[in-house]
Amino acid sequence: MKSPTMRLPFHRSAALLGALALTLVACTSDEDRQSAEDVDVPEPQVPYDPEPVSVQAPAEDAEVDDVQFPTHLSDRISVDPAWDTPPQVHDGVFLAPREQEGKLVFSAVGAEGTLLWTAERPLSGSGFTVTAADDRPLAVLTDLDNQNETDESAGVNAATAYDLHTGEEVWGPVEIPGPHQGPGLVFAEQDDESVDSTGRQVALDSATGEPSEEDSHIIGEFFGTLVFTDGNELVASTDRQTNELWRTTVPEDLTHEATEEIVSPSTNRLPPGSALIGLPEQGYGLWDITEGELLKGDLDDAMFDLMSETWVGVREEELVGFDLNGEQVWSEELSAEAQLLGVGGVMAYVLTEKDELRTYNTVTGSTTRLYDPLEEGTAAIPLAFTDRGATAVDTGTELLLVTDTSRPTEDYAEDETSIDADP
């Protein structure tokens, strides 16, 4: 049986691949660098208020007349938070910025569609992440220490943590060496001589904002757990590396590489307690970082379906599903260069090299048709999910939030009346 597919507009697929890039490695030619030198100096930043503002009001309803949702999301209320980049999500809250009047405005939106709080930052302060400290969900935003002055040449050099639900300040601002690098609370100094490398690197303690020791290679900070290398060992700890959770020998397939080359994708799309660790060119291992156990090796990417509790991974030209213990339960052949866009609601969304969207059942691996072939409109692609089904989607031109709240039944009656009234 041929897999159901949906072709995507070029602008959508290009935007998705850029937004969901898993590394910060830049491939820039000498000609590009020369062109960059000719770029005009940015205009001075506009004034902004860095303090979060509590809103606690419904987000604006989304215009969805020309949008086609997966069938299981079509009866939900959708809102438009006006995000410009895909949101990060934790503990039922989505967070992302938008550009507005020469500055960034971050918006935290609950799964039911409530705009919880907003915070302004300069355009250079686009780095952000979500994390946790002692089970308290946090949003961490970057800023300038000379905020609201006209000179932005110092770059982003401060970070502040806020309660993800309320916007209440928890710690900061604290000094950081440079922009957000990720995953989690990892920041690095930009290397002036090369766009492909970074200088001094630190990870902040999620509970206090204190920086980690600087004599270790940091792999990432994952919701309060710091993972780094110590010689030929992987180590996980909390409290600025003082509270060691576990340590284990670096896997054999990585021992021939310098441990400083071992990384985790900069955009962590996995739930707390897990991480991808390895080398982009050779593949990643999926780790349970609460116990220090390798669940699955040799993966290009992986995501977790909260509803079915199934892992879905990409391995060369294969899509695989495996259980909580890392046991493979199904596999399906993929085309080369396929991209895993999102996993949630018992579905995996894959973009093929021909810009076609394919959907797979996460439990069985079978292909399925989620979009009504008789409907018209741009397909909304799910990107981020909560355990109750709220979903951030990309329509190609907008990033919307499909809430976990169903539309009132009278809405359906109005739709049917409108359809019957058409000549």
Image (cartoon, rainbow, N blue to C red):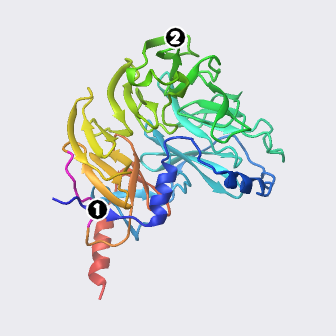
Circle 2/circle 1 CB separation < 8 Å:
no
Q: In which quarter of the view is residue 378 placed?
A: bottom left
**Viewer-nearest residue: 133 or 205:** 205
* Magenta segment boundaries in residue numbering: 365-372
**Viewer-nearest residue: 23 or 398:** 23
Q: Is residue 293 above or below residue 385?
A: above
Q: Is residue 107 above or below residue 413?
A: above
* Location of residue 223 in the rendering, given as x and y in whole percent from the top left corner: 49, 28
Q: CA distance from mark 2 to mark 1?
A: 49 Å
Would you name the residue on which mark 2 appears? 243
Would you name the residue on which mark 1 appears? 5
Q: Quadrant of the N terminus?
A: bottom left
- The residue type indicated by label 1 comes to Thr
Q: Residue at x 46, y 32 (%)?
A: 279
Q: Residue at x 34, y 39 (%)?
A: 387
**Is residue 368 located in the magenta-colored stretch of the structure?**
yes
**Is residue 36 located in the magenta-colored stretch of the structure?**
no
Residue 190 placement, left or right of 294: right
Task: Answer with mark 2 or mark 1, whichever residue precedes in sequence.
Answer: 1
